[in-house]
């Protein structure tokens, strides 16, 4: 009688009260994977000097150095730091690190996401749990995202910045600083082509990608683009990387109300010197001091 009663009770036990076998199996599998990763990290510990050298060698690649540092304004000053791409390369070459993002829960209109970075060798872990709204703001309006692909891209974009922060929290700070310095040296020593051509290409990229005109950039730096130095060019790259990674917005850097194109001081001086020559020619006289021809391309560069 007791056996029949037990069978009856088990048969009609609500589903939520029954143990979830699949959940337990998944949990056990994940636990075994973590144990295996920790065991391998302890069996094959990183060589700090070799890991540092691998990171610096990676930073000597111009393609990585060009996207290694971002920059954005805060409180009237400029804040710069390693970009998402550089943080990933540092973690990959440092070794024995597990990092990424996990979508813990997806609700109506939002997702709960966790970003993490775990040094398996030292058992140092950094996690960040945050909420991502399924919406995107554009042109002053908020658009709700319904397409699963758009939602995935929004979650991945928001999570990448948190992963970057987590990675930099578990990597020694001096290693990160050396990587940034090496990237700057790579950009300075491996620049291809004349500076004016590289500046012109960057101005075109700003205009095509973010509708940032040459006048807006010149207003930001305080002088004309034909006066940009290598340092200014590097700052321009950092601003572009900041916009690309979503660390800042166009309004944080540039004044969209700037429409008047300012001429360079060298151009103004040339015009002032040309006026007496024109007056002399009008009177049938030639001023010998201004008979030489000057090519305008020597001091003014057009980016159109």
Image (spheres, grey):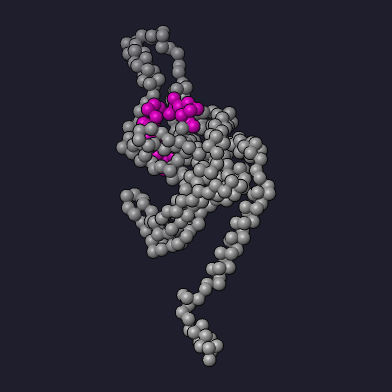
Q: Quadrant of residue 281?
A: top left
Q: Identify which residue, 195 or 176, lies in the foreground.
A: 176
**Quarter of the rendering occupied by the C terminus:** top left
Residue visible at 50% across and 76% down in the picture = 18
Q: Residue furthest right?
A: 43
- Across and down, in percent, residue 51 comes to 63, 40
Residue at 59% over, 49% down: 120
Q: Is residue 264 left or right of residue 38?
A: left
Seen in the picture, residue 211 relative to 38 is either above or below; the reply is above
Magenta-colored segment: predominant secondary structure: helix
Residue 227 in sight here: yes
Q: Is residue 233 magenta?
A: yes
Residue 71: where, in percent of width, then height?
44, 37
State which region is magenta: 206-234
Q: Is residue 149 visible?
A: no
Indicate whether residue 222 is drawn in magenta.
yes
Percent from the top left, x then y, of residue 259? 33, 35
Instruction: Using the rendered view, name the quadrant where residue 32 is placed.
Output: bottom right
- Give the number of callouts: 0
Residue shown at 55% from the left, 41% from the top: 171
Give whichever of 252, 292 is nearer the camera.
252
Of residues 48 and 163, which is closer to you in this image?
Answer: 48
Residue 148 vs 81, above or below: the answer is: below
Residue 219, image x and y in percent?
36, 31
Residue at horizontal 65 percent and vertical 36 percent from the top: 49
Q: Residue furthest bottom?
A: 1
């Amino acid at each position: 009688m007791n056996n029949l009663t037990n069978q009856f009770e088990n048969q009609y036990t609500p589903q939520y009260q029954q143990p979830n076998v699949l959940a337990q199996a998944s949990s056990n599998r994940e636990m075994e994977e973590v144990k295996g990763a920790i065991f391998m990290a302890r069996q094959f510990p990183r060589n700090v000097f070799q890991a540092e050298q691998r990171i610096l060698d990676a930073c000597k690649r111009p393609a990585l150095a060009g996207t290694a540092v971002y920059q954005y304004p805060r409180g009237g000053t400029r804040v710069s730091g390693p970009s998402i791409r550089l943080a990933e390369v540092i973690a990959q070459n440092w070794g024995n690190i597990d990092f990424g993002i996990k979508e813990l829960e997806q609700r109506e209109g939002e997702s709960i996401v966790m970003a993490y970075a775990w040094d398996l060798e030292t058992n140092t872990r950094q996690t960040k749990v945050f909420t991502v709204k399924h919406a995107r703001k554009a042109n002053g309006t908020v658009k709700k995202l319904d397409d699963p692909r758009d939602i995935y891209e929004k979650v991945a974009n928001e999570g990448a910045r948190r992963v970057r922060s987590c990675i930099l929290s578990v990597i020694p700070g001096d290693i990160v600083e050396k990587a940034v310095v090496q990237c700057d040296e790579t950009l300075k020593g491996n620049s291809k082509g004349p500076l004016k051509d590289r500046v012109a290409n960057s101005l075109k990229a700003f205009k095509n990608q973010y509708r940032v005109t040459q006048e807006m950039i010149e207003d930001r730096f305080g002088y004309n683009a034909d006066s940009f130095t290598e340092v200014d060019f590097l700052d321009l790259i950092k601003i572009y990387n900041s916009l690309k990674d979503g660390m800042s917005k166009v309004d944080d850097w540039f004044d969209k109300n700037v429409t008047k194109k300012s001429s360079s001081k060298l151009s103004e001086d040339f015009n002032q010197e040309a006026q007496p020559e024109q007056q002399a020619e009008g009177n049938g006289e030639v001023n010998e001091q201004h008979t030489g021809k000057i090519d305008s391309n020597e001091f003014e560069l057009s980016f159109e």
